[in-house]
């Protein structure tokens, strides 16, 4: 049986993943996922490719209460209602979208942690900050298949999945492209393609530093840089750990 073994989101793009037991998945993905992002002093999108330490900052966002919290490894916490300031445009993978600078203590705290000036931004529309699609889905067995004697128990958070599955053969999820899958009682997802990987997968989510050339490890195991699959939401629904996943042929 194929089932859900992990559910993750990150209200601020490239910050630490938050594990969930249960979430609602709408047409734009998991509620509040990637609603915010950070830009550098030139207004360019900042991710773990440019600052791997972002992986150590934890965050939470209650959309219904409009309450954002950010916590740092030293225990420092910024928790308040995000106040939106001036409008800015941002570029992500060749496309442009708009957001608003979030005024307040957030910017000083994140800048101090990163060691250079950054600004926190809230995307104007939900779903603007996804790389390509709202859901990244990955099988545990596919990750385990690239483990070696000197690289064991790979932390699946390196690959920043939305949904983690088990009960498959390695890379079996690649065969789902072009099909739809039912996840839990309600959610239906159309599988659009394989998930291309970048240098972020070399970042250790526990240390915030690069500790292995995971791209080359992936290439050695698969002959390419893809791992996992992308999905579009056809029918929204609530999902929980342990929910069954069924393929619609």
Image: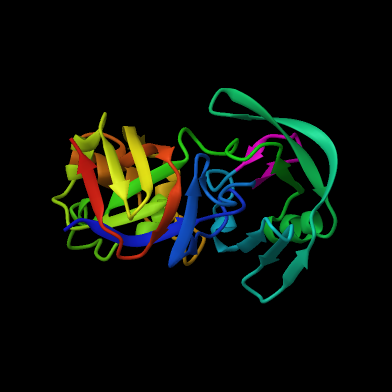
The image's colour scheme reads rainbow
Count of labels in the image:
0
- What is the residue that sits farthest to the top in this orientation? 94
- What is the residue that sits farthest to the front in this orientation? 185
Counting from the top left corner in percent of width and height, residue 180 is at 28, 36
Residue 211 can be seen in this image: no
Counting from the top left corner in percent of width and height, residue 68 is at 71, 60
Q: Residue at x 68, y 34 (%)?
A: 44
Please state which of residues 167 and 222 is positioned toward the viewer in this rendering: 167
Residue 13 can be seen in this image: yes
Magenta stretch, residue numbers? 36-46
Query: Which quadrant does the N terminus fall into?
Result: bottom left
Q: Residue at x 45, y 58 (%)?
A: 8
- What is the residue that sits farthest to the bottom in this orientation? 75
Q: Residue at x 38, y 47 (%)?
A: 187
Counting from the top left corner in percent of width and height, residue 2 is at 20, 56
């Amino acid at each position: 049986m194929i089932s859900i073994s992990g559910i993750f989101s990150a209200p601020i793009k490239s910050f630490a993943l938050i594990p969930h037991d249960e979430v609602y998945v709408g047409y734009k993905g998991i509620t509040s996922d990637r609603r915010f992002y950070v830009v550098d002093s030139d207004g360019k999108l900042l991710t773990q490719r440019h600052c791997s330490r972002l992986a150590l900052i934890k965050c939470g966002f209650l959309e219904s209460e409009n309450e954002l919290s950010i916590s740092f490894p030293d225990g420092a916490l910024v928790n308040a209602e995000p106040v939106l300031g001036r409008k800015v445009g941002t570029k992500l993978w060749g496309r442009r979208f708009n957001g608003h600078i979030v005024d307040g203590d957030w910017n000083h705290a994140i800048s101090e942690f990163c060691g250079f000036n950054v600004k926190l931004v809230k995307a104007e529309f939900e779903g603007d900050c996804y790389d390509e699609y709202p859901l990244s889905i990955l099988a545990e067995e596919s990750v385990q298949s690239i483990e070696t004697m000197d690289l064991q128990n790979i932390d699946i958070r390196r690959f920043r999945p939305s949904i983690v599955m088990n009960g498959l053969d390695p890379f079996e999820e690649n065969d789902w492209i072009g099909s739809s899958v039912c996840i839990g009682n309600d959610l239906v997802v159309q599988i659009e393609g394989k998930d291309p990987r970048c240098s972020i997968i070399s970042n250790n989510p526990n240390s915030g530093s690069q500790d292995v050339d995971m791209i080359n490890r992936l290439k050695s195991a698969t002959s390419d840089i893809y791992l996992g699959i992308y999905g579009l939401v056809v029918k929204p629904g609530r999902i929980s750990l342990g929910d069954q996943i069924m393929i619609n042929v």
